[in-house]
Image (tube, rainbow, N blue to C red):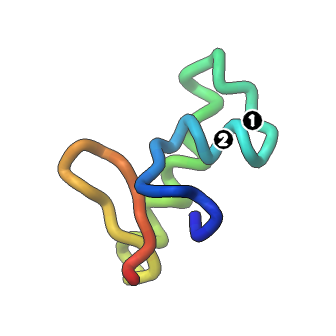
Amino acid sequence: MRQAAGPVMAREVGEVVGVDVSVKAKLEPPRSKLVRLVERGWLRKLPDSRFTTRL
């Protein structure tokens, strides 16, 4: 997240960590992990469903 130039979608995070992004069901685990980080206050979710660091 911090290496990205700006807010990122779950699909972009999946590509970086090696998830097959062509299948929507494969994106749910990374997306749910991102949402958990939002709930814990580590990340922020923007209204357009992109994620960014809190800083």
Is 45 placed left or right of 47 in the picture?
A: right
Q: Which mark is residue 27?
A: none
Dot 1 surroundings within 10 Å: few (below 14), some, or many (20 or more)?
Answer: some
For the point 74% across and 26% down, the residue is 20
Which element carries disc 2, helix, strand or loop?
helix
Relative to residue 42, is residue 4 depicted above or below?
above
Q: Which mark is residue 14?
A: 2
The image position of residue 1, as x and y in percent, is 58, 64
Which element carries disc 1, helix, strand or loop?
loop
For the point 80% across and 39% down, the residue is 18
Relative to residue 41, is residue 14 depicted above or below?
above
Image quarter hosting the C terminus = bottom left
For the point 50% across and 59% down, the residue is 34
| Chain-order first, disc 2 or disc 1 | 2
Which residue occupies the extreme top position in the image?
Answer: 22
Q: Quadrant of residue 15?
A: top right
The image position of residue 50, as x and y in percent, is 36, 49
